[in-house]
Image: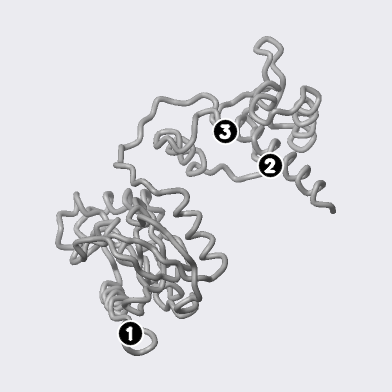
């Protein structure tokens, strides 16, 4: 199959998924929805609807009075299992001004809001330089301000990945000064200059390549009914939920869920989850903090 044919096939499948998305979440759509969103012709939109009807004839019917295709009571998704996160993430993108409403697949925007979080500025040109270094496996010279130094300094790092703690984006990189792998906050990059040979390969970043299982459970002091609802909230089946986390992200994971220290000692109505394998997790955290500098002496 040619690249053009692959693109055409992908575009058709995407439009069919769009039809199904609108039918499932909003209950209806018409040709103009497809035309406006994808910029296709009227005949193409008609063909897409006809194609969807061939694939899932029990999912929709045409209401002549409303002049729209409506979802039937027997609707069964033919392309994707309905995903609430997929829908809600589009609302979040609108609320956080990542996307305009017309750029999402949601037409009838419900009344909603997103908790405001101070926006951390990332220079797109700096991000572009970092991405280029990651792809080329090269080191970069950066002007970086940390909170452990009074002023910004120029330093060499070898970046190999990006990571987010849920609020901030970091660059995972080998630090040529400390000779260890560390996280560098993207908003604190002031400038990126020349490239050079890497200081260490990504495969040497053990905390990044190693995974740790964190076993989560409802707070033991909750009532049986409260434990059931907490389990429902977090998708816990049975007594606990095992979450695999990169060792390099373990600290952020625990902090985000307020699981640092001894969460079981906090009031259960405020602390819904605890770590069931606390000793294993503490050992893993200590191992992540005790990195041995690569290459002997620090420079």
The local secondary structure at tag 2 comes to loop
* Residue appearing at x 80%, y 47% in the figure: 4
Observer able to see residue 25: no
Q: Return the x and y of residue 221 as percentages of the image width and height.
A: 19, 58
Numbered circle sitting on residue 292: 1
* Residue appearing at x 35%, y 77% in the figure: 180
Q: Return the x and y of residue 111 as percentages of the image width and height.
A: 40, 25
* Residue appearing at x 47%, y 60% in the figure: 130
The quadrant of the rendering that contains the C terminus is bottom left
The one nearer the camera, 165 or 154, is 154
* Front: mark 2 or 1: 1
Indicate left or right for 32 with 143 as reference. right
The one nearer the camera, 35 or 4, is 4
CA–CA distance in space, label 3 to label 2: 17 Å
Quadrant of the rendered image containing residue 246: bottom left
Indicate left or right for 123 with 25 as reference. left
| Figure disc tally | 3
- For disc 3, the marked residue is 105
Quadrant of the rendered image containing residue 34: top right
Q: Earlier in the sequence, mark 3 or mark 2?
A: 2
- For disc 2, the marked residue is 78
Indicate left or right for 217 with 62 as reference. left
* Front: mark 3 or 2: 3
């Amino acid at each position: 199959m040619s690249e053009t044919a692959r693109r055409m096939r992908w575009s058709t499948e995407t439009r069919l998924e769009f039809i199904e998305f609108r039918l499932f979440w909003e209950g209806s759509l018409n040709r103009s929805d497809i035309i406006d969103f994808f910029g296709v012709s009227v005949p193409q939109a008609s063909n897409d609807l006809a194609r969807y009807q061939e694939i899932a004839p029990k999912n929709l019917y045409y209401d002549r009075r409303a002049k729209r295709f409506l979802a039937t009571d027997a609707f069964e998704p033919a392309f994707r299992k309905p995903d609430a996160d997929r829908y809600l993430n589009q609302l979040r993108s609108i609320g956080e001004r990542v996307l305009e409403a017309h750029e999402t697949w949601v037409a009838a925007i419900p009344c909603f809001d997103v908790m405001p979080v101070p926006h951390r500025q990332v220079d797109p040109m700096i991000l572009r330089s970092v991405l280029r270094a990651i792809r080329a496996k090269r080191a970069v010279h950066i002007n970086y301000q940390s909170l452990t130094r009074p002023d910004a300094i120029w330093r060499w790092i070898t970046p190999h990945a990006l990571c987010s703690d849920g609020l901030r984006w970091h660059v995972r990189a080998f630090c040529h000064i400390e000779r260890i792998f560390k996280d560098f906050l993207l908003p604190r990059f002031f400038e990126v200059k020349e490239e050079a040979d890497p200081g260490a390969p990504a495969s040497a970043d053990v905390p990044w390549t190693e995974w740790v299982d964190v076993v989560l459970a409802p707070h033991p002091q909750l009532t049986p009914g409260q434990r059931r609802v907490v389990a429902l909230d977090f998708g816990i089946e049975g007594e606990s939920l095992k979450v695999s986390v990169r060792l390099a992200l373990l600290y952020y994971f625990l902090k985000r869920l307020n699981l640092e220290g001894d969460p079981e000692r906090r009031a259960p109505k405020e602390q819904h989850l605890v770590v069931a394998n606390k000793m294993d997790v503490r050992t893993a955290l200590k191992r992540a903090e005790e990195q041995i500098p690569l290459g002997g002496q620090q420079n």
